[in-house]
Amino acid sequence: MLISCGDALIDFVPTRNTEGREAVMPAVGGSCLNVAIGMARLGAPTGFVGGVSTDMFGHMIADHATASNVELGLATRSDHQTTLAFVRIVAGESHYAFYDAETATRNWTYGRGTIPFATVEAIHVGSTTLVNDQGAAETKALIADARASSTISFDPNCRPNLVKNKPAYLARMAEFAGQADLIKMSDVDFAYLFGEEPHEQRAKVLLGQGTSLVVITRGNNGAIAWHASAGQVEVQAPKVEIADTIGAGDSFQAALLFALHKQGRISRQQLKDIGADELRRALSFAANCAGLTCTRPGADPPWSHEVTWSV
């Protein structure tokens, strides 16, 4: 099984009403839930770990996840309200305003002893759950228990408007990166975390810390990856008609993890041994899935029948 641990929320995505005025439409989202949905829709056995409310929006989240074949048995249900995120698209980038105080995601606690890690090939973590102290602490505890048997995937998916203490946040992200086997981040996130440092220079630092694979996504410019033994691999982004970019990075992450799973390269040792051609196929598949997600509004990762995968 593959597991994604973190945020589940409702995005209010931009649209237009019948009079042509700006409006918003609710859509299930949350970076880590999107990753779980993306993996499950592609056909991987997938579970979600995190807080899901029992309020109206929480039922929307649960119904959406279940319809996408995500196992919710490991999620924590509570009567805390659902996190809401309002989205605006500025210069092609999604910008968010979060309403996240005392929510189900913020009040999630890791149920120690409840996850059968021996059956879990990989666990993905990241995003807004790691901004607050409790979410970060609970995720660290989960990783500590999981690392002996499960590959750790990490995407910081930074949300600067939620960060109150940037130096502390940077230190926290560095700590999570130090525990990860696979790190993926957008070029926008990279700039927030590392400024103008060259991508390759930072990738070599991360590989030197024990990470096997570092991937930077660059929107229309495709993705570039560095691997401890396979070296540097670059793939192009497909040319598509873009509706919006909401969930594109999550779809890339989900498809990459799915591809590695299908190749038999998801375990820690197998990921270390992956070849350049295998990695290129996995990255190309991920880029194509992200491109398809961009053609429709909101976070709507593709299903297996919509994409072609070949090992």
Image (cartoon, grey):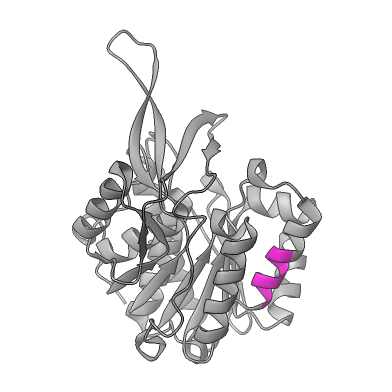
Residue 48 spot, x, y in % from top left: 36, 66
Residue plotted at (60% across, 74% down)? 140
Which picture quadrant has residue 309? bottom left
Residue 197 in view here: no
Q: Is residue 13 above or below residue 206?
A: above
Q: Looking at the picture, tell me which residue is in the foreground, 129 or 157.
A: 129
The reply, left or right, for residue 181 in relation to residue 190 is left
Q: Is residue 193 above or below residue 20?
A: below
Q: Looking at the picture, tell me which residue is in the foreground, 243 or 45.
A: 45
Residue 232 spot, x, y in % from top left: 62, 71
Q: Is residue 305 above or below residue 165?
A: below
Residue plotted at (77% across, 50% down)? 165
Highlighted range, magenta: 172-178
| Residue extending furthest toward the front | 79
Q: Looking at the picture, tell me which residue is in the foreground, 231 or 109.
A: 109
Q: Is residue 133 above or below residue 117?
A: above
Residue 124 spot, x, y in % from top left: 48, 70
| Residue extending furthest toward the top | 19
> What secondary structure characterizes most of the magenta part?
helix
Quadrant placement of the C terminus: bottom left
Residue 171 spot, x, y in % from top left: 76, 64
The reply, left or right, for residue 297 in relation to residue 149 is left
Residue 167 in view here: yes
Does the stretch in magenta take in 107?
no
Quadrant placement of the N terminus: bottom left
Residue plotted at (50% across, 84% down)? 146
Does the stretch in magenta take in 176?
yes
User: How many numbered badges does the structure rendering display?
Assistant: 0
Residue plotted at (28% across, 42% down)? 56
